[in-house]
Amino acid sequence: LALALARFTPSLVLQPDGLLLEVQASLRLFGGARTLWRAVRDTARAGGVQRLRMAAAPTATAAAVLARVEPASPALRRLPLAQRLDALPLAGALAAWGLDARLHELLHGVGCRTLGDVRMLPRSGAQRRGLGPLLDAIARAHGQAPDPQPWFELPQRFEMGLELLHR
């Protein structure tokens, strides 16, 4: 799938359960976001992808968590990115980022149900209680911290054999 989608952008990031594409430079070439979105969707489906969730955001971390957790609601998609991220359920975001599920119990005990609730907590106290990785992920999603990603490197060569029916 990464090789098939590399025709839209060379900037791909492999994730355990999906792919991230950085398409800002490709938007004009492919006729805008909506046209590019459809082409990516059609290519993924032609490649055998059964379940497809897509999201667009300024940072890779935000796009990944929105695609994995955000409910498919057109009303939510019209909100600014910060409000969309703050509305995400805490349990889903923790699972999407691969963080310890025990954090959910801790935060649920102090009344946190969404990422926005976690952002309202005093940072120093949250750090002392072991919420540093979660706070870092939230900061990367909001663009307040660097969000480096390891790019997928395309193979230098491609070989494919084709067995013919006759000699």
Image: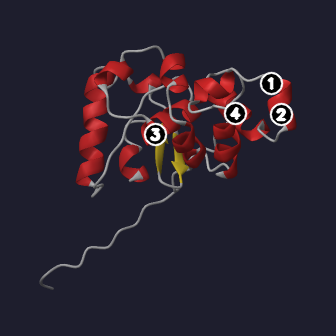
Mark positioned earlier in the residue sequence (4 or 2) = 4
Residue lying farthest left? 166
Q: Residues within 10 Å of mark 4 (few under 14, many from 20)?
A: few
User: Which amino acid does the dot numbered 4 rest on?
Assistant: Val
Q: Give the alpha-carbon distance from disc 1 to disc 3, as whole Å.
A: 24 Å
Residue at left 31%, top 28%?
73
For badge 1, the amino acid type reads Arg
Determine which residue is flagged by label 1.
123
Quick one: SS at disc 1?
helix
Image disc number at residue 69: 3
Is there CB contact under 8 Å for labels 2 and 1? yes
Disc 4 vs disc 2: Cβ atoms closer than 8 Å? no
The reply to whether callout 2 and callout 3 are in contact (CB within 8 Å) is: no
Residue 67 left/right relative to 13: left
Placement of 62 over or under 45, stated as above or below: above
Q: CA distance from mark 1 to mark 4?
A: 14 Å
Q: Quadrant of residue 158?
A: bottom left
- The residue at the point 73 percent across, 33 percent down is 136
| Location of mark 4 (residue) | 110
Q: Position of residue 1 (x, y in %)?
A: 38, 53
Whole-number angstrom distance, CA of label 4 to CA of label 2: 15 Å
Q: CA distance from mark 2 to mark 1?
A: 6 Å
Amino acid at the residue labelled 3: Val
What percent of the width, then of the height, locates residue 129? Answer: 83, 39
- The percent position of residue 162, horizontal first and vertical second, equals 26, 73
Q: Which one is earlier in the sequence, the residue at label 2 or at label 3? A: 3
